[in-house]
Image (cartoon, helix red, strand yellow):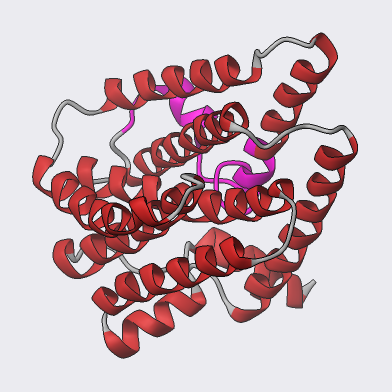
């Protein structure tokens, strides 16, 4: 129990971020879950097409906004007891629990599609996103357009640079998502100065070289990644699944971070 408290429970209660132990365990669990999802999708012959990607993005945006509301509750700017109760800082509203929660809802929505033969999952994601945007909007009436614009520009520059080079347009979206994560992290920590990096490896890069280099490093890695996927002799399903994973793991923290610096949470 001492080991679990030190490496898993205390970082949540103390809000100190991640360590090498829980990072490794969470990564192993994530890889196992991603493989199981891969098998389910492939066995059920569910295509990773435009509709699937739009549904994934809708649920990712929903999860990110939900996380920002929890940040707002945790910072003490929320007074509504219902919102404070639903979005309290606990394992269900932060990583890794929020990934399990949102991922579970996504799978349920896709199962509804599969069983009813109707495309309802995207609308479920959009409705969840809309409800949470309304909640977030009710909390704040002021936003920092400058932070939002600067972060968006930094994310869009590499996206525009690679867009025309890849036939599969999911590939430049991967670059956009990873650049957004890097840009939002840079803006939050080095430009704004009111935040700190919670993840082990990104913090190592940021502390040693600066978070501008972390932003550039994410762009470099994402371009190498999509180039290798593009060259790989694999099925379109397998390629799109890998690209979808990279999209989610860039977009989820990127959207959360850009919303945090924009709303000042």
The quarter of the image holding the N terminus is bottom right
Q: Is residue 94 left or right of residue 118?
A: left
Please indicate, yes or no, whether residue 241 appears anywhere in the rendered image.
Answer: yes
Return the x and y of residue 59 as percentages of the image width and height: 55, 32
Residue drawn at x 51%, y 47% is 168
Q: Is residue 4 above or below residue 194?
A: below
Does the magenta run of residues contain 117? no
Return the x and y of residue 213 as percentages of the image width and height: 29, 79
Say how many tags the image has.
Answer: 0
Q: Is residue 46 left or right of residue 171?
A: right
Q: Which residues are magenta?
A: 78-102
Residue drawn at x 69%, y 70% is 5
Residue nearest the observer in this picture, 156 or 7: 156
Quarter-wise, where is residue 2 in the image?
bottom right
Does the magenta run of residues contain 83? yes
Return the x and y of residue 261 as percentages of the image width and height: 23, 49
Residue nearest the observer in this picture, 123 or 67: 123
The quarter of the image holding the C terminus is top left
Return the x and y of residue 17 as percentages of the image width and height: 49, 67
Residue drawn at x 46%, y 45% is 169
Quarter-wise, where is residue 140 in the image?
top left
Q: Name the residue at the left extreme.
A: 146
Q: Is residue 104 above or below residue 71?
A: above
Q: Name the residue at the bottom extreme.
A: 208
Q: Is residue 82 left or right of residue 245?
A: left
Residue nearest the observer in this picture, 105 or 80: 105
Please indicate, yes or no, whether residue 198 appears anywhere in the rendered image.
Answer: no
Residue drawn at x 34%, y 64% is 182
């Amino acid at each position: 129990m001492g080991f679990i408290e030190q490496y898993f429970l205390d970082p949540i209660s103390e809000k100190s971020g991640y360590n090498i132990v829980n990072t490794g365990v969470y990564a192993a669990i994530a890889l196992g879950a991603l493989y199981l999802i891969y098998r389910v999708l492939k066995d059920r012959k569910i295509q990773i097409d435009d509709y699937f990607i739009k549904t994934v993005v809708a649920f990712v945006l929903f999860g990110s906004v939900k996380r920002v509301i929890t940040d707002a509750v945790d910072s003490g700017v929320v007074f509504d007891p219902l919102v404070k109760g639903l979005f309290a800082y606990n394992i269900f509203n932060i990583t890794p629990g929020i990934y399990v929660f949102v991922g579970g809802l996504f799978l349920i929505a896709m199962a509804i599609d599969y069983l009813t033969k109707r495309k309802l999952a995207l609308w479920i994601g959009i409705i969840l996103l809309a409800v949470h945007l309304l909640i977030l909007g009710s909390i704040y009436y002021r936003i920092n357009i400058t932070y939002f614009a600067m972060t968006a520009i930094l994310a869009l520059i590499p996206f525009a640079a690679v867009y025309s080079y890849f036939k599969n347009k999911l590939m430049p979206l991967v670059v956009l998502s990873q650049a957004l994560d890097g840009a939002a992290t840079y803006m939050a920590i080095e430009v704004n100065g009111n935040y700190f990096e919670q993840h082990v490896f990104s913090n190592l890069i940021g502390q040693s070289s600066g978070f501008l280099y972390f932003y550039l490093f994410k762009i470099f890695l994402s371009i190498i990644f999509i180039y290798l996927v593009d060259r790989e002799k694999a099925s379109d399903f397998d390629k799109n699944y890998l690209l979808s994973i990279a999209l989610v793991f860039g977009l989820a923290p990127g959207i959360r971070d850009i919303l945090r610096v924009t709303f000042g949470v």
